[in-house]
Image (cartoon, rainbow, N blue to C red):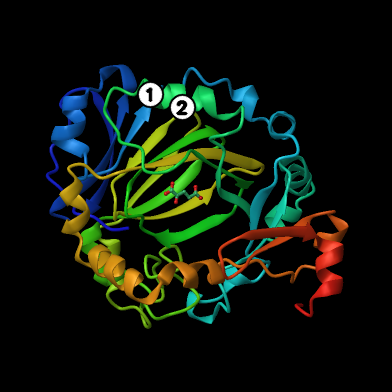
Amino acid sequence: MDKTNGDHEAVSGRCETMSITESSTQELTIDRIECSEFSDSDFRKHYRGKRPFILTSALSTLSPQTYDLDNLGELLGDEQFYVRIYGEHRFNQPKQNWDKYCDSVSMTVSQYSQLIKQGKAAKEHMYLAYQPITNTNLAQPIIDALEKLPFELDPATELNIWLGPAGHTTPLHWDSNDGTLLQTTGSKKLILFPPSQSRNLYPFSIFQKTFPPWFSQVHPQTPDFLRFPRLKTALDHKLEIVLQAQELLYIPAFWWHEVTSLGDSYTCSFNRFWHPKPRWRSLTNRRGVMISVLAAMVNLKRQISQIYQPVNTVDNLRKMGAKLSHTDSSGKHHTQSAETRESSSNLK
Ligand SMILES: O=C(O)CCC(=O)C(=O)O
């Protein structure tokens, strides 16, 4: 994702502002605004498509106990979810050396919660990421909270859950729709850059097979200026915030973001994407448009499903009683027990 850093006027008088100095002349900020003091006209005038902001008290109708690991396991029952497995060593290497984005496995939330509690999810960087929950009994209170927001949004995707151990980082990327990230448990550090910095963040090439082209090659928390000299300029435009429980972050389409779960336990968030409005805003990002066109031309969708295609490389998945899954060339998902998969395939 990437976006334009729009005008920078703060909504006067009622925002606590977190600011970071940009190039000593211009100040970039992410406003923290109390939900009851925000309006649709504030949204359209100052933020929509222009800059991120945090709404506090937006999720006060949600009970924190609901998102307790045991309770989530009970609420979601036998439902299977994909869990990404990045593995112990991927994050210690430059992204150019990754052989693939991640492996994945499907399991219930109860099974995954055990892995979090035992520390295995943290050790293996396992993340139950971007899984739709719209059809579960977890969804309605969150959808109700989103419907009560004091500004208008046009849904582009389902409601998704992001559940994972503290310490995990979702690599720097952008999305082509506006996003809202709702934090229900724990806190997350977000590093954001405006779309204007895309070139200085070295996006992966459209032809590269490991990462989709909306991911950056850089690690902003451990910068390699020899390899990526323009990153120095991007860092002058960096925004960094900590999203606390019960807060909601609005991320305009095409804004770069890297997300790290903080604390020493686990975090639970939900997100939903929204069509950029007015609709022509999607066309204002040259790279976004180019990627859409190329995607259509080279059937990028198929490439991506291959990138995420689960492969059994983790021996102890079998011990976890996990189910492995894969996507065939027609896009259909297949799931079988780790035991079966291991004996019927030569994948390591
Ligand atoms: O919470 C995360 O790990 C990533 C969330 C994200 O990328 C998003 O909401 O757009």
Q: Judging from the image, what secondary structure is the residue with disc 2 in?
A: helix
Q: Say which residue appears at 83% left-offset and 54% top-offset.
A: 320
Q: Residue at x 25, y 43 (%)?
A: 29
Secondary structure, mark 1, is helix
Q: Nearer the viewer, residue 248 or 157?
A: 157
Badges 2 and 1: C-beta atoms under 8 Å apart? yes
Quadrant of the rendered structure where residue 44 is?
top left
Q: Is residue 157 above or below residue 175?
A: above
- Which residue type does callout 1 highlight? Glu
Query: What residue appears at the point 71 percent right and 41 percent down from the top-left corner?
Result: 109
Asked whether, in this view, residue 277 is left or right of residue 240, the answer is left
Q: Position of residue 237 (x, y in %)?
A: 25, 58
According to the picture, the residue beneath numbered tag 2 turns out to be 143
Residue 147 is labelled as: 1
Q: Given the image, on which type of amino acid does mark 2 rest?
A: Ile
Q: Quadrant of the N terminus?
A: bottom left
Q: Is residue 243 left or right of residue 266?
A: left
Residue 138: percent from left, percent from top: 59, 29
